Image (spheres, rainbow, N blue to C red):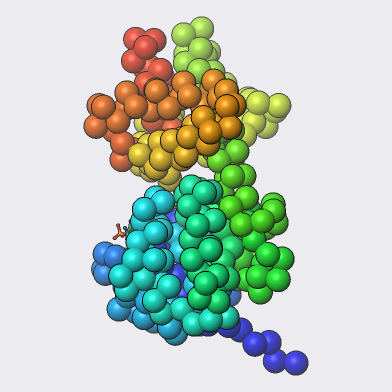
Amino acid sequence: MKEVRESLGFVGLGIMGRGMARNLLEAGFPVRVWNRTRERMQPLVDAGAHHSGSPAELARDCDIVFTCVSDTPDVEEVVLGPDGIAEGAAAGSLLVEMSTISPRVTRRIAERLEERGVAMLDAPVSGGSEGAEKGTLSIMVGGEADSLERAMLALRAMGRQVTHVGPIGTGQTVKLVNQIVVVVNMLAAAEGLLFAQAAGAEPARALEAITGGAAGSWMLENRGPQVLARDWSPGFTVDLQQKDLRLALEAADELGVPLLGAGMVSQLYRTLQRAGLGAEGNHALVKALERLAGFEIRGA
Ligand code: NAP
């Protein structure tokens, strides 16, 4: 039996979106793309995607639209704003929102789309730029099971693990859980490497020794070597990391839950933003600790 593939659209071709859209193309889906900065569409067009003139135009031509832009107001703009996805999307189509944004606003956007007969999943991701490129993301999905089933083939082209975590908005909540664990993990990695250096152990050897043990983690394995090479190029920028911490801390305030580690890391990142380092990778957290300690971690 011939498999029927729905036509897909992808809005937002940044560090994450460009790899994700490319994986959809490579999985054989027809893909339309739109990006605010037009030049960024060209590599995808060269790889076989069609480009659209606006999110509304893209949505008119697609059954399922994926979005991966920066922050909550950006998603509101590309979905509900002038020339946005809601203007073009036909009843019966599906929006899969993959940015990291406010769970509350996610639910509001879903309500607005529902009035037009458009379904929505929130499906934020984890796994960094590497995961986006290799199609190995972890995708946490909120929404109705039938919508997830419809999007599953495409999500599997972008991610290794797709987990249905609950109703709409829950994907974003679980993503914030992920971010709390990521930043406290990075803090631990930075402290450990600083300590190694101070105590006279070669940081590169220490990293090699602990990566495969109980202290091992994705952050340590992927960002540890970057720290030692003093390569601050971003897989995920300090500014975007702060955006996610803000979302987590706001939600924790509403819930009355203490987030001690995440709150402290947010303050440390703030010192980097004040120093003009917001565009560096989130592993630059090390620099905030180095300033407190008064020495730098040496690489090899
Ligand atoms: P990025 O490289 O900064 O890309 C952001 C994308 O959003 C760009 O395509 C940008 O368009 C577009 N955009 C931003 N504001 C817009 C607006 N108002 N209207 C239209 N387009 C807009 O960011 P990223 O790293 O790909 O992250 C995208 C999302 O994924 C964020 O929510 C982030 O938290 C999440 N995420 C990132 C990572 C990671 O490791 N990078 C991991 C997991 C989740 P232009 O090209 O015109 O600027």
Q: Residue placed at 57% from the left, 58% from the top?
A: 122
Q: Quadrant of the C terminus?
A: top left
Whole-percent x, y for residue 129 in the image: 47, 51
**Front-most of 114 and 194?**
114
On screen, residue 230 versus residue 188, left or right, reads left
- Above or below, 215 against 141 in this view is above
Whole-percent x, y for residue 132 in the image: 51, 57
Whole-percent x, y for residue 198 in the image: 46, 8
- Above or below, 263 against 119 in this view is above
Residue at the front extreme?
115
User: Which quadrant of the frame does ligand 1 lie within?
Assistant: bottom left
On screen, residue 104 versus residue 238, left or right, reads right
Q: Residue placed at 71% from the left, 26% from the top?
A: 214
Q: Quadrant of the N terminus?
A: bottom right
On screen, residue 72 versus residue 111, left or right, reads left
**Front-most of 151 and 289?**
151
**Front-most of 160 and 33?**
33
**Front-most of 231 and 104?**
104
